[in-house]
Structure formats: structure tokens, C-alpha cells
Image (tube, grey):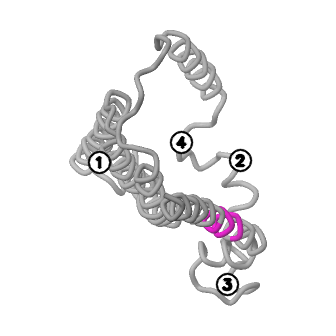
Amino acid sequence: MDQGQGKGPRLITAVHDILLLTLLLVTTVAVVRLRNLVAVVMLLGLYSLLMAAVWLVLDAVDVAFTEAAVGAGITTFLLLAAVLLTGQEEKPPRRGPIGPLLIVAATGAVLLYATADMPPFGAPDNPIHRHVAPYYIDRSLDETGVPNMVTAVLASYRGYDTLGETTVIFTAGVAVLVLLGGRRRREDEIEEDE
């Protein structure tokens, strides 16, 4: 038993986790059921905010910040712009949902089966705690001069990786803006011709 945490705080944490997962499930079901694309985009933004809260609970603050900024912020804006250009209602499906449902169920079953081989969550003897993490904990301040270990890992040890991720996100954003701008120019040209 963990000495630092009593039964009361663990119960509150468990209730908080169950509430977050329930909200994620309800949001997912609502996204699948709705046909109004504006409502779907707004719910996807809510889903991203809920996922940011999940990452925050898991002490992955950097991932939570990225999820909130990219998932709830930029992506919601771009999807709303796309809906503005394409229309607000989803067309009815031509086929039934049985085939995709079977594929999703099979994929979920494979993923659940694969998690059986994973080490227990948070166990101190997990492989990550025996190799890379001790190196960063022991040497990050001396090697980088950065007191925050997460910042040291993201900016120094994985600096090129972080730069690459930022470049990909920037390039994707520019490409979307160019595509949306090109469509508007074509629509303006069509209106001028009429």
C-alpha cells in the first residue's frame, strides 16, 4: 500500500478518473450519433479538452498542454472552417454500420490482448524506470543547465525531435490555410464571372 496516500484521496482520485472516462464515453457516443457537423466539431473540441484533463491527471502536463492547444484550439478552428465551406449536415450513410463496427471491435480486442503483456502501471521496477529515466534524473541539470527536467528532455535531449514535430504542425497548418484560401479564391472568381 502506498504510504503517502490514504483511502480517502484514492477514492476521490478513482471517482475523478471514472467521471472523466464517463464524460469521454458520452462525448464519443454523441459524436457518432449526431449528423450536424458543427455540433460534432464542438463536441470533438470538448473531447480534446477532456483528454487534456486525462493527460493532466496522468502528470503529463506537456502532453495536456499540446492536446488543449492543438486538439481543442487549432483543430476545432480548422474543422469549423472546413464545415463552413462544405455544409453543416452529414449525408446519410449508404451502408449499415456492421462492417466498421466489426473492424473496430476486432481492433479493440487485439489492443486489449496486447495490454496483457505490458508492465503494471506506475510500478517502480518497470523498464522505463531502470534505464533512461535515471540517466535524465541524475544528469539533466549538469548537462543542460535547465532546472525543469521535462523542459530539459524536450528542449535539449529531444530538441531535434521537438523541432521536427513543430515543423510538421506548422507545415500542416500552412497547407490547410493554403487549401482553404485557394477554394475561396475560386469561389470569388466564379461569382465575378456570373
User: In the image, what residue type sits under mark 4?
Assistant: Phe
Residue 171, image x and y in percent?
A: 69, 67
Image quadrant where one finds the N terminus: top left
Q: Was residue 172 drawn as part of the magenta stretch in this picture?
A: yes
- The percent coordinates of residue 101 (x first, y second) are 50, 15
Tag 4 secondary structure: loop
Which residue has dot 2 on it? 127
Kindly check if marks 2 and 4 are in contact, taking CB atoms under 8 A apart as contact.
Answer: no
- In which image quadrant can residue 154 be found? bottom right
Characterize the magenta stretch by its predominant secondary structure: helix
Q: In which quarter of the image is residue 160?
A: bottom right
Q: Label 1, on which residue?
A: 13
Q: Residues in magenta?
A: 167-174
- Relative to 93, 17 lies left or right: left
Q: In this view, does 60 lie to the left or right of 50?
A: right
Measure how far apart labels 4 and 3 are at the Cα level: 27 Å
- Residue position marked by numbered label 4 in the rendering: 121
- Residue 134 visible in the displayed image: no
> In the image, what residue type sits under mark 3?
Leu
Whether tag 4 and tag 3 are in contact, CB under 8 A, the answer is no
